[in-house]
Image (cartoon, rainbow, N blue to C red):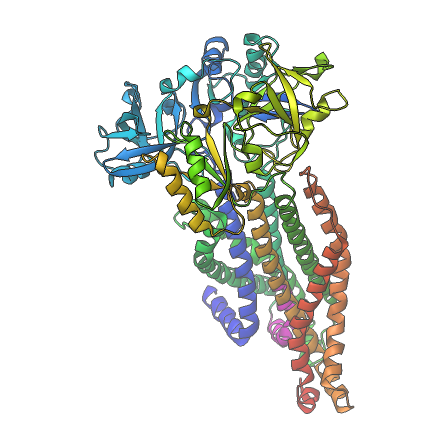
Amino acid sequence: MLKNFFKTTVRTLLRNKTYSFLNIFGLAVGIACTGLIFLWVEDEMNYDTVNVKKDNLYQVLNNWPYPAHYSTFETTPGTLAPAIKAEIPGVANTARCTYGQTSALFTIGSKQIYAGGVYADSTLFSMLTMPFTQGNAGSAFTQLHSMVITEKTAVKFFGETANAVGKTVRVDNKQDYVVTGVIKDFPQNATLQYEWIAPFDIVEKNNRDWASNDIITLVELKSNAGVDKVNSRLEGLIRKRVPGSIASSMLFSMNDWHLRHDFENGRETGKGRIRYVRMFTLIAWIILFLACINFMNLATARSEKRAREVGVRKVLGSGKKTLVVQFIGEAMFMSMLAVIAAVFIMALVLPAFNLLTQKNLSVNLGSPLHVAVLLAITVVCGVVAGSYPSFYLSSFNPVLVLKGLKVKAGSAGLIRKGLVITQFTVSIVLIVSTIIIFQQIQHVKNRDAGYDKNGLLKVSLQGDMGKNFNLIKQHLLGTGMVDNAALTGYDLLNGGGNWDGFDWKGRTVNEKYSITYRNVSPELLNTYGIQLLQGRDFSANPAADSVNVIINESLAKMLHGKSPIGEIIRAGDNRSFTVIGVVKNFVFSDMYGKPDPVIFFSQQHNEWQSYMYIRLKKNVDLEQAVAKVEAAIKKDNPAYPVDYRFVDEEFNQAFLSEMLVSKLSRVFAALAIIISCLGLFGLAAYTAERRIKEIGIRKVLGASVTGLAGLLSTEFIKLVIVSILLACPIAWYAMDAWLQNYAYRVNIQWWVFAAAGGAAIVIAVITVSFQSIKAAMMNPVKAIKAE
């Protein structure tokens, strides 16, 4: 029986080669798309699962009040972790790490390499899962100047992973460190990524101040500890140590680090990348559903050809149930072929998809989960796609079909049209969404940032660059490629120091806010290209402005005087500073939000700074300019390679998630259109087939090819117009809700809907024209004789 089923099914597929190919191809594209999204979603959902203790691991975050909102920061005092371990029940362990990745210069023989890592407590090895391939966690930090490196770093340093333990590397041309351990490379879907880890004791002396917030604090809770109870004790721990402090601390679960990292007024919103995961999961199922719709339309479009087959089978004794099983079986068989084809398509496009998503995904048919998903998709597609055609075809009256009478479509015609309308509605919604997402990203990227990010270089200070800054600046200006250079203690795009001890005349007790501060050399505002709105800039001599400050617009509005120039701002240690200038607000930290208040101090001690910013002249050749900048810096700092970044590239890095969404949405919108066109092609073929005699008679009576093509196309254009009318409000509602996630957002324009609708009509006309023109050009004699 099974053998006869396969023989019958294969014969049917071969007899209708074109439609069988379109059916399988449409399903394969939909399944491949769903499969790729499944791999991406799986990777996103599995972030940090390498850590066995993931469910009990937390990061301590600090909330600071700003005007009208709270801001949440990752950094804490270096003294917080020991206090948590000592005072709060339920805490199993704590670990401190330096913030971000410290870029250090490693010298191995004649080789010099920059590598990023952290200074951390040895407890980090027991909290995170970091398998040692050489050495062990117990002896890793028994000596002060020791270091644990990853396998990739071992290859980078020594050319091999073997025998790395015991070797010595020189760090920043100052101190020799001994490699005491090698750990496996961090997986790509791990939040914490380091090339090396060194003892926190090396930097502890600089992190003993409760008022300083520069350290990442990690906490491991005991299995029976209540998070709410720990949070209640943790919340006021800093205020307990620092009277008058307005900071409050809380735990942030590792389970949420990657997908739910959005905060609003000091509380988790449950939002973040998870919304992209949900959005693309929904899109994947929609595209798969569109592919199933195609199958229905293409199967029913061939109903005329299979009507006699159904009639003969019924006369020979086949019941409706038998026919339903046969047709669903055919659908399942085609679905299986589509899944096989989809796997090949996925393998073919996966390198490009990995490049697009910056991941290293693989189909991995050895995974039981992946195989189970493919089997589930096969069954779902077979049943969903084959159910309606099987019941429709099996319901034909054998007497009528064997007499050669036309099968009455009944409600089938309306259902087919409804399915096409559904397909194009979804496609138009995706087109509109793609345009608006692209607009939003460009809107924020091209907004007035308050500084000129183009032609601006950020150089990490190494060696004597800070001490020799004045000489380096002269050499830079002498290249003819540089307009200005300046020093700062903080990265331009990622905030600054935060302190709540500033005071001014007229400030009430309820107005105690955290203020962002930056220590800068006098040239910084000019180098950044920040506009001075009132007052003056810092003078060339930092000492002359040691008691003066410059503030931004946001802070100026908080001062109660008519003009902020001349106002006195007091620090908590009884120091007083006079406001000499107000600069335009500039974008930093939150690229979508409103700028927080900022105060600039003129820094006298260049060796305390962290970055040098260099403004290149307009229209210079960037490659030549960078080469001359490197040569100029190395004149007075020869022992260190120059570690630089372009600010505009760093600015664009802030939008990686949104840019990925934009690119993926364009891909999925194109796929939805392609699949919808296959469905429209099937319906056009079905219509032409049913009206073939009418077309022949009209042609005999003088109808032109153009007129006939237009007659056949009009019906489908009406369907697309209905789709446009349905899609526009759906797309507006969906994108308006999406844009609410951004404080700085684009307005939805009417022309976006017009453009999407126009594109859909053009695509539909091109798709239908092939069948319409083919039918109109057919020999009328053959058309009239056609059975």
Q: What is the x, y in percent for residue 529?
A: 59, 39
- Quarter of the image for residue 786 reads bottom right
Total marks shown come to 0
**Magenta stretch: helix, strand or loop mostly:** helix
Asked if the stretch drawn in magenta spans residue 313, the answer is: yes
Q: What is the x, y in percent for residue 204?
A: 40, 17
Up the image or down, 377 lies above or below 652; here it is: below
Q: What is the x, y in percent for residue 632?
A: 39, 40
Bounds of the magenta segment: 294-317
Up the image or down, 198 lies above or below 421; here it is: above
- Quarter of the image for residue 685 reads bottom right
Q: Quadrant of the C terminus?
A: bottom right
Report the front residue among 374 and 154: 154
Question: Does residue 652 appear to the left or right of 142 in the view shown?
Answer: right
Report the front residue among 300 and 659: 659
Report the front residue among 319 and 292: 292
| Residue 321 seen from this side | no
Question: Does residue 719 appear to the left or right of 539 in the view shown?
Answer: right
Question: Does residue 552 appear to the left or right of 367 in the view shown?
Answer: right
Asked if the stretch drawn in magenta spans residue 725, the answer is: no
In percent of the image, x 47 and y 36: which residue is there?
A: 47
Q: What is the x, y in percent for residue 591?
A: 61, 37
| Residue 561 seen from this side | yes
